[in-house]
Image (cartoon, rainbow, N blue to C red):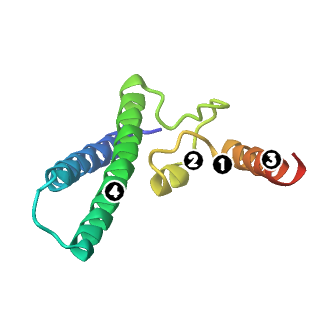
Amino acid sequence: MRKTDLVKFKRIFIEQRDQIMMNVAIVDENLMVRPEDKDEVDQANADIEQSMRTQLKNRETVALKKINEAIKRIEEGSYGECENCSDPIELRRLQARPTTTLCIACKEEEEKTSASTVFYNRYLH
């Protein structure tokens, strides 16, 4: 992979990481419990809103982990290399899914294996 591509991806990851950290801080601030007199409907709405914010925070945490791992791979020189077969991951795939760690062939194999396992567990076991 060209050095210019690596610099571009790293810049994108850093920008995404900064945005996620800002989002998580906002969600954390809004997750603080505020004791107020609420009727049952208000309390139910507050509970739903808190659940949605928690789900958002969890999603952002997973994305942040993937971004940090991708930055680490860039710094170690292994970004763009399939973690399964060590072949280069196509640039088009990285542009579509920058945090990916598998080439197309390995990802397809993983999905087939996963689908077979789900089918076996659900219908044959």
The type of residue carrying mark 1 is Ile
Q: Say whether residue 59 is left or right of residue 125.
A: left
The type of residue carrying mark 3 is Asn
Front: mark 3 or 1 = 3
Q: Which residue is mark 3?
A: 121
Q: Say whether residue 100 is left or right of residue 124.
A: left
Q: Residue at x 35, y 35 (%)?
A: 68
Residue 115 drawn at (x, y percent): 76, 51
Front: mark 4 or 2 = 4
The type of residue carrying mark 4 is Leu
Q: Which residue is mark 2?
A: 90
Q: Residue furthest right?
A: 124
Residue 112 drawn at (x, y percent): 77, 49
Front: mark 3 or 2 = 3
The label on residue 56 is 4
User: Do the CB atoms of the residues marked 1 and 2 lie less than 8 Å apart?
Assistant: yes
Rounded to the nearest angstrom, the CA distance separating label 3 from label 1 is: 26 Å
Rounded to the nearest angstrom, the CA distance separating label 4 from label 2 is: 30 Å
Front: mark 1 or 2 = 1
Rounded to the nearest angstrom, the CA distance separating label 3 from label 4 is: 30 Å
Most foreground residue, 7 or 10? 10
Instruction: Indicate which disc, 4 or 1, sits on the residue closer to the N terminus.
Output: 4
Q: Is residue 44 above or below residue 16?
A: below
Q: Tell me the crowding category of disc 1: few under 14, some 14 to 19, or many 20 or more residues within 10 angstroms, Cα based.
A: some
Q: Say whether residue 19 is left or right of residue 59.
A: left
Q: Quadrant of residue 77?
A: top left
Residue 122 drawn at (x, y percent): 80, 53
The label on residue 104 is 1
Secondary structure category for the residue under label 1: helix
The type of residue carrying mark 2 is Glu
Front: mark 3 or 4 = 3
Instruction: Indicate which disc, 3 or 1, sits on the residue closer to the N terminus.
Output: 1
